[in-house]
Image (cartoon, grey):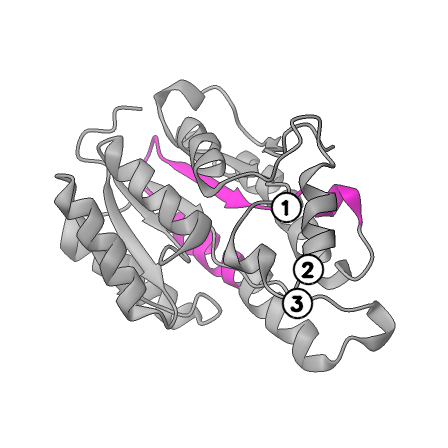
């Protein structure tokens, strides 16, 4: 897929892995829609960084759990750049709890954003993505590792992997690939928040490369699947975790 004049919509792109993906895709020559839920200043900073490097980007506020907001975001992409060619489903939250102690708010918020949010954007992309496009969903290697207290979060990501394979088949005839990237422990605010230093150290040594992943590591994997070299990969989950699982 040529990246000339192509447009990528990256959800949750105001910081962390999403910001790294947005800047990497812009570097690869794509226009970028930088989605954010509440971090307007952070999203503006990502847009400014892309424009400073010669790329084109616009910020788009939308809660992906809201189908109407998702539709408006795609409408914005239409008006700004003529449509969307690449959807990166990165928006997500992680709240840890043993299942017996998980309250309704913890369960509902993760299902609403991680799962329903990705369903909303995939559904819209399935109708509006230009032929020859790409969809890359963000899963998590914890869906395979099955760590205690990660149950609800891991369940949402496991569902994303199933949907990835199904949507890849439903896009038959349009040249659109649908894949997922499943990061392992990655040094982001989402991952580091609330974890004791000893836990972070243990997880950083858990893979054979003996370090945490970086947002750039994950962005590189996403860029491969979103770009011309990933065109023959479809319906797959790429576990970007340094060999942890």
- Check disc 1 and report its element: helix, strand or loop: loop
Quadrant into which the C terminus falls: top right
Instruction: Report how many numbered discs are placed on residues in the image.
Output: 3
Residue 14 percent across, percent down from the top left:
35, 58
Q: Earlier in the sequence, mark 3 or mark 1?
A: 3
Task: Tell me the distance, in whole angstroms, between the alpha carbons under discs 3 and 2.
Answer: 7 Å
Q: Are marks 3 and 2 in contact (CB under 8 Å)?
A: yes
Do tag 2 and tag 1 residues touch (Cβ < 8 Å)? yes
For marks 2 and 1, the one nearer the N-term is: 1
Q: Name the mark on residue 239.
A: none
> Which residue position holds label 1?
140
Is 132 a magenta residue?
yes
Q: Is residue 68 left or right of residue 235?
A: left
| Left or right of residue 147: residue 57 | left
Q: Residue furthest right?
A: 100
Q: Nearer the viewer, residue 22 or 216?
A: 216
Residue designated by label 2: 153
Q: Toward the viewer: 140 or 64? A: 140
Secondary structure of residue under mark 3: loop
Give the residue displayed 63% in from the left and 66% down from the top.
111
Residue extending furthest toward the front? 197
Q: Position of residue 228 (x, y in %)?
A: 35, 21
| Magenta segment boundaries in residue numbering | 117-146
How far is the residue under mark 2 from the one under mark 1?
A: 9 Å
Which image quadrant is residue 236 in? top right
Identity of the residue drawn at 29% across and 69% down:
40
Disc with the residue nearer the chain's start (3 vs 2): 3
- Helix, strand or loop at label 2? It is helix
User: Marks 1 and 3: in contact by CB < 8 Å?
Assistant: no
**Alpha carbon separation for disc pair 3 and 1:** 14 Å
Residue tagged by mark 3? Answer: 95
């Amino acid at each position: 897929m040529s990246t000339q004049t192509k447009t990528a919509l990256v959800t949750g792109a105001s910081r962390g892995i999403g910001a790294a993906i947005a800047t990497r895709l812009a570097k690869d020559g794509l226009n970028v829609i930088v989605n954010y839920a509440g971090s307007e200043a952070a999203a503006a900073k990502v847009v400014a960084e892309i424009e400073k490097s010669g790329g084109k980007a616009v910020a788009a506020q939308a809660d992906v759990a809201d189908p109407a907001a998702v539709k408006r975001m795609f409408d914005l992409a239409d008006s700004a750049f003529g449509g969307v060619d690449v959807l990166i489903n990165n928006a997500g939250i992680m709240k840890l709890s043993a299942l017996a102690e998980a309250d309704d708010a913890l369960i509902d918020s993760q299902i609403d954003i991680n799962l329903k949010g990705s369903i909303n954007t995939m559904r819209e992309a399935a109708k509006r993505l230009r032929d020859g496009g790409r969809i890359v969903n963000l899963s998590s290697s914890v869906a395979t590792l099955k760590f205690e207290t990660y149950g609800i979060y891991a369940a949402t990501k496991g569902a994303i992997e199933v949907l990835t394979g199904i949507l890849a088949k439903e896009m038959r005839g349009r040249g659109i690939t649908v894949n997922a990237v499943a990061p392992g422990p990655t040094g982001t605010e989402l991952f580091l928040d609330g974890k004791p230093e000893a836990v972070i150290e243990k997880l950083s040594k858990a893979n054979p490369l003996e370090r945490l992943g970086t947002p750039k590591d994950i962005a590189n994997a996403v860029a491969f699947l979103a770009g011309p070299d990933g065109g023959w990969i479809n319906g797959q989950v790429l576990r970007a975790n340094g060999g942890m699982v």
